[in-house]
Image: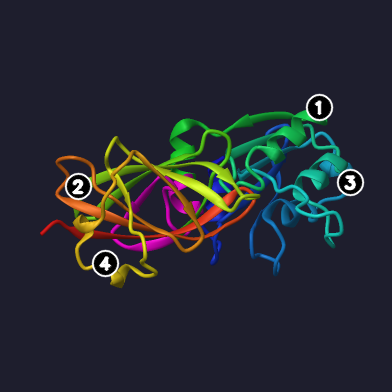
């Protein structure tokens, strides 16, 4: 597991992924994403070995192996490669937060009788911090933009005023309905108002002027909402930039209350 993490730290692009193939306690090969141009870490490591070496081996990978995203993609997924290679066990660092992949690689391996386990909690935390460009997918700071998965019961996010200012406001994204082009932004009761008529954060000179507070806002692409729980000393402006089948892209900006 630690060797796989060492490999993923060699990556110069995100998400960082490292892989190790071993059998009977002996390391057979290693690989990291970007070691070969546009080739995933698991494939890099496995393709260094013969079929005989792969068979019965264990793959340690810092990120859940990918699955096919469309039927006519040019190269088989890492999950399919692992299955066809005769690998007997896979040890995963973290599940992929990309909503299109989340738990799909894990499930496919199990369905093909491959034993799957996970890194220790401490090592999972280390992987989480270093794998993705923005670190913890559940915490954001100040102002920015991020794509996050909204699957099953949704995703909880803490908006912290800045890395040096621990004031924070919790929000949740839930009930993604791509067919209808909407998703729910949720916070505590009475904390959410819709900034009707606005197109940009710059249009909002005073967040407190908007009426009809609720615990949620059903948002469509381009809409803006304001989150300010009772007693909070700042507010969060949230804009839904885009939404996809399993993910959304949103932008946020914190404002001190005047």
Q: Earlier in the sequence, mark 4 or mark 1?
A: 1
| Near-viewer residue (16 or 225) | 225
Which residue is painted at 59% across and 32% down in the image? 118
Q: What x and y, as percent, mark residue 114?
A: 77, 30
Residues marked 2 and 1 touching at CB (< 8 Å):
no
**Nearer the observer, disc 4 or disc 1?**
4
The Cα atoms of the two marked residues, 2 and 1, are separated by 47 Å
Crowd tier of the residue under label 2, counting other residues whose Cα lies within 10 Å: few below 14, some 14–19, many 20 or above: some
Q: Is residue 119 above or below residue 238?
A: above
Residues marked 4 and 1 touching at CB (< 8 Å):
no
Left or right: residue 31 compared with residue 186: right
136 in the magenta segment: yes
Q: Secondary structure at mark 2?
A: strand
The Cα atoms of the two marked residues, 4 and 2, are separated by 22 Å
Which residue is painted at 51% across and 47% down in the image? 183
| Near-viewer residue (30 or 14) | 14
Crowd tier of the residue under label 3, counting other residues whose Cα lies within 10 Å: few below 14, some 14–19, many 20 or above: few
Q: Secondary structure at mark 1?
A: loop
Stretch of the chain drawn in magenta: 128-145
Quadrant in the rendering for residue 257: bottom left
Q: Return the mark for residue 167.
A: 2
Q: Residue furthest left?
A: 258
| Near-viewer residue (38 or 87) | 38
Query: Which residue in the structure is indicated by mark 4?
Result: 204
**Nearer the observer, disc 3 or disc 4?**
4
The Cα atoms of the two marked residues, 4 and 1, are separated by 55 Å
Q: Earlier in the sequence, mark 4 or mark 2?
A: 2
Q: Secondary structure at mark 3?
A: helix
Crowd tier of the residue under label 1, counting other residues whose Cα lies within 10 Å: few below 14, some 14–19, many 20 or above: few
Query: Which residue in the structure is indicated by mark 3?
Result: 51
Q: Return the mark for residue 238.
A: none
Q: Residue furthest bottom?
A: 202
């Amino acid at each position: 597991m630690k060797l796989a993490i060492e490999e993923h730290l060699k990556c110069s692009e995100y998400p960082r992924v490292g892989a190790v193939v071993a059998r009977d306690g002996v390391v057979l090969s290693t690989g990291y994403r970007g070691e070969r141009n546009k080739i995933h870490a698991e494939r890099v490591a496995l393709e260094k070995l013969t079929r005989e070496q792969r068979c019965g081996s264990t793959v340690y990978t810092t990120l859940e192996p990918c699955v096919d995203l469309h039927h006519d993609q040019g190269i088989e997924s890492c999950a399919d490669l692992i299955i066809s290679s005769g690998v007997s066990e896979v040890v995963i660092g973290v599940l992929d937060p990309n909503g299109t992949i989340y738990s799909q690689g894990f499930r496919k391996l199990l369905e093909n009788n491959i034993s799957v386990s996970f890194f220790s909690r401490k090592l999972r935390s280390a992987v989480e911090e270093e794998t993705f460009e923005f670190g913890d997918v559940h915490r954001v700071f100040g102002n920015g933009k991020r794509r996050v998965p909204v699957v099953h019961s949704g995703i909880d996010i803490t908006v912290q005023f800045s890395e040096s200012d621990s004031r924070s406001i919790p929000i949740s994204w839930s009930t993604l309905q791509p067919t209808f082009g909407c998703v729910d932004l949720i916070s505590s009761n009475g904390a959410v108002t819709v900034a009707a008529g606005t197109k940009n954060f710059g249009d909002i000179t005073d967040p407190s002027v908007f009426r009809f507070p609720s615990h949620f806002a059903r948002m469509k692409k381009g809409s803006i909402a304001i989150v300010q729980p009772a007693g909070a000393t700042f507010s969060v402006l949230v804009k839904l930039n885009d939404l996809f089948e399993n993910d959304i892209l949103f932008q946020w900006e914190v404002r001190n209350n005047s």
